[in-house]
Image (spheres, grey):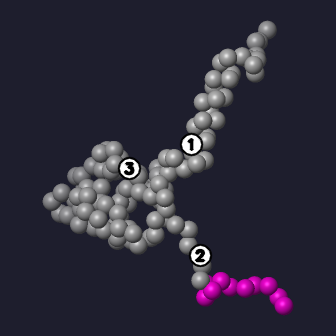
Amino acid sequence: MRKYRNRKSRKFRKSHKNRTRRNYKKMIGGETPSPISPNAKIPCCVCEEEFSRKTMLVPAACLKKHKERAHRICEHCWWNPDTGFAREDAEHGCPGCKKGLPLNPPLKPRKPSSDEIIEITDD
């Protein structure tokens, strides 16, 4: 015969309390940074200079894991013939993840302009 944990037991209350506390932190935004514009300058995870987000490249492993918040590498650090990230003999893991750098903030949602909206209803 299997014993089921009673909802009033101490173990159940502790685990439920911890779960709700974690969810509350996520809900109030304690761990997520505020969104930024697509043209914002963010640091390169190799040289740590700031560049426009549009001009930077993203390691595939980091993009797959962290989506839009992935670490970015400037074009110079990516294509440098001596120490570049894209060289055949270079290790292709994300340097930002290896260094333990914080992830980039997410992008602000953009409202479409009136030119971009196509009305398809019949009047």
Whether residue 8 appears in this view of the structure is: yes
Q: Which mark is first along the chain, 3 or 2?
A: 3
Quadrant where the image shows the C terminus: bottom right
Do the residues bearing badges 1 and 3 touch, measured as CB atoms within 8 Å? no
Residue 18 position in % (x across, y down): 60, 30
Do the residues bearing badges 1 and 2 touch, measured as CB atoms within 8 Å? no
Q: Residue furthest top?
A: 1
- The residue pinned by badge 1 equals 25
Vertical position of residue 79 compared to residue 13: above or below: below
- The residue pinned by badge 3 equals 102
Residue 56 position in % (x across, y down): 34, 67
Separation (CA) of disc 1 from disc 3: 18 Å
- The residue pinned by badge 2 equals 111
Q: Nearer the viewer, mark 1 or mark 3?
A: 1
* Amino acid type of the residue that numbered disc 2 sits on in the rendered structure: Lys
The residue located at (60%, 35%) in the rendering is 21
